[in-house]
Amino acid sequence: MDVPFARPRFYGGEAEALAAVIESGWVSQGPRVQEFERAFAARVGAEHAIATTNCTTALHLALYVAGVGPGDEVIVPSLSFIATANAAWYCGATPVFADIDPHTYNLDPRAARQAITPRTKAIMPVHQIGLPADMDAFLALGREHGVAIVEDAACAIGAEYKGRPIGSLGSLACFSLHPRKVITTGEGGMITTNDGELADRLRKLRQHAMDLSDLARHSATDVVFEAYPERGWNCRMTDLQAALGLCQLAALDEILAERRRQAERYTDALADVPGLDVPFEPDYATRTWQSYAVRVRAGAPLGRTELMRRLLRDGIATRRGVMAIHHERAYEGEDVLLPHTEAAAREALMLPLFPGLGDAAQDRVIDRLTAHLMREAA
Ligand SMILES: Cc1ncc(COP(=O)(O)O)c(C=O)c1O
């Protein structure tokens, strides 16, 4: 493969940081996780950050503390990674799919409003591929109907909504640290909140609801026994992951700037190519460009999948846009009419974009993509 689709980038110092953790003898959740949580919270303007094993477990815990349980409904976009719906299922709740805004690909607050029933316990807007959803509308909807808003911010560290960082808006926000995301710890997740009591409960729930952390036990000056006031899960991040996360966080501004630069290069080069729509940029948001998705319009000279095939033959890896969860067998039978989701799932195409891609490789993507569409249009 000449041009891969994505690859994480490390900026130096990671090997030393990991060696220091190994040297310390404390490799499970401990002081580095605490340091990473503090740095993460400071970066996104939240009062508290709680590290987890991944974003899916973060979403599960966030929905759980929001009171979601068996028999409840959680409104989610179908146009999202399947983890969004699975997190509701983890709670024994039913994910209810609502349509997206066709310009932003994010859950449409009007569609979410129409999907509210007496069983709705939470709404989960997803900041899809790092573009913030219309949070003022969702927060107002949550207040009006007494339902929780939990943000799926898997791709959104560093994104801003009306000048405020995602993670600082007051609702529980859940981030992913998977290598396909903006920064990575290999696997990992983070929940942010401004509510100290919720943060405290989440910290316990992620380690079987034990009321004493390992860190507290190790620094105790007397014999202490832990208690388990409720049931929980094991969603602990390791200090090895946190050490990597601290290095990645230090590089976040550089990563975001490079992602933006590449996105602007794509948009400049592709804006006038027949049959393509470049991403819509709402003026309320600063996005992370976790992915760059063009739309191959219905009347384009080549269909999206055929275009992907031809690019693959050129040695260029692409991906379909975000999946539609209700198309999958795992959620089949859901009786929903989601025309904007259907169209986006059919027509969106993601192009390689990652720090380290290089201008020559990006130019090759632009050149081949343009050539295939122009040739067919001629
Ligand atoms: C929108 C969205 N939500 C949740 C997840 C799950 O993240 P993780 O792999 O960290 O569990 C992903 C990951 O792809 C995602 O894109």
Image: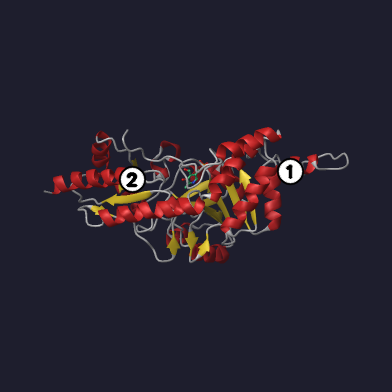
Q: Position of residue 356 (x, y in %)?
A: 40, 43
- Say which amino acid is labelled 2: Leu
Q: Is residue 207 above or below residue 281?
A: above
Q: Position of residue 192 (x, y in %)?
A: 60, 54
Q: Residue at the location (59% across, 48% down)?
A: 190
Disc 1 residue lies near ligand 1 with CB under 8 A: no
Q: Secondary structure at mark 1?
A: loop
Q: Nearer the viewer, residue 180 or 200?
A: 180
The answer to which of marks 2 and 1 sits earlier in the sequence is 1
Q: Nearer the viewer, mark 2 or mark 1?
A: 2
Q: Is residue 281 above or below residue 175?
A: below
Disc 2 residue lies near ligand 1 with CB under 8 A: no
Residue extending farthest to the left is: 378
Q: Nearer the viewer, residue 367 or 251?
A: 251
Q: Residue at the location (53% across, 58% down)?
A: 166
CA distance for labels 2 and 1: 46 Å
Task: Report the number of discs.
Answer: 2
- Say which amino acid is labelled 1: Glu
Label 1, residues with CA under 10 Å away: few <14, some 14-19, many ≥20: few
Q: Position of residue 325 (x, y in %)?
A: 42, 43
Tell me the number on the disc at residue 230.
1
Q: Nearer the viewer, residue 174 or 372?
A: 372
Is any part of residue 65 visible from this angle?
Answer: no
Tell me the number on the disc at residue 351.
2
- Is 107 positioned to the left or the right of 32 in the image? left
Q: Residue at the location (25% across, 34% down)?
A: 313
- Is 136 positioned to the left or the right of 319 in the image? right
Label 2, residues with CA under 10 Å away: few <14, some 14-19, many ≥20: many
Is any part of residue 357 visible from this angle?
Answer: yes
Q: Quadrant of the N terminus?
A: top left
Q: Nearer the viewer, residue 172 or 314?
A: 314
